[in-house]
Amino acid sequence: MKRALGCAAVALLATSCEQDVSKPNYEYSPDMVGAVAYESFSPNPVTKDGRTLMLPAPGSLARSQMPHHFKAGPEEAARAGRELKNPYPASPEVLARGKMAFARYCSPCHGSGGLGDGLVTARFPSPPSLLADHARGLPDGQLFHIVTHGQGLMPAHGSQVMPEDRWKIVHFIRSLQNPQQTARQEAP
Ligand code: HEC
């Protein structure tokens, strides 16, 4: 009995695969087949703004986009210092990422420990130490702004370093400035 059923199934499969390409296939439930689709950018009488792909609501952000409402310059840097907070926690993973990004983008000038003794300082004016009182006194948002837009002789890094990595670099700079506190945080 089992074998007979098996043969029948094989026979059915075999016939269902046989196709006469000169005739249209049998349409099962054809309701959606004939639907008229609008093109994404064609006008549309049904939607509110008359477009098929409606405009996003004001203030919408693209996925993973971080808005940045600051221009270059010292006043804007100071405002960023007042208004922006580091959105990431100073976790070991964040610090490790910040360290890697700092080594890649900042250490050629600032040195891997932030002392202002990077390789290019032989031919380029030395940056101030990031461990000095001045840099310690800069709020997180201002550090983020300086990395994004540059400052004085330092070129802007907004186009090279992703915003999230800029914030992680800020945590790494803090960890250079306060190694003991970081060690305490990382202790289990
Ligand atoms: C091409 C060399 C160069 C690179 C690369 C560079 N910097 Fe700088 N940086 C400077 C110089 C020079 C200054 C001093 C700018 C001035 O005020 O004239 C400076 C200043 C700063 C300051 C302000 C310090 C203070 O006390 O005012 C911070 C913070 C800083 N850099 C962080 C970074 C970070 C973070 C990176 C990496 C994303 C980076 N820099 C990459 C050269 C560089």
Image (spheres, rainbow, N blue to C red):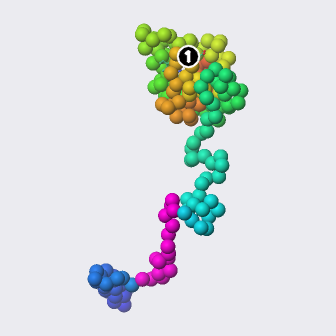
Prevailing secondary structure of the magenta residues:
loop
How many numbered discs sit on the rendered protein? 1
Mark 1 CB within 8 Å of ligand 1: yes
Q: Is residue 67 above or below residue 49?
A: above
Q: Position of residue 109 (x, y in %)?
A: 48, 16
Give the residue type that dot 1 points to: Gly
Is residue 93 visible in the rendered structure shown here?
A: no
In the displayed structure image, the side of residue 11 where residue 91 appears, left or right: right
Whether the magenta-drawn stretch holds residue 37 is answered as yes
Report the residue at 57% width, 60% height from top: 51
Report the residue at 52% width, 18% height from top: 154
Q: Quadrant of residue 187?
A: top right
Q: Which residue is mark 1?
A: 152
From the image, which quarter does the N terminus lie in? bottom left
| Figure quadrant, ligand 1 | top right
Residue nearest the observer in this picture, 184 or 106: 106
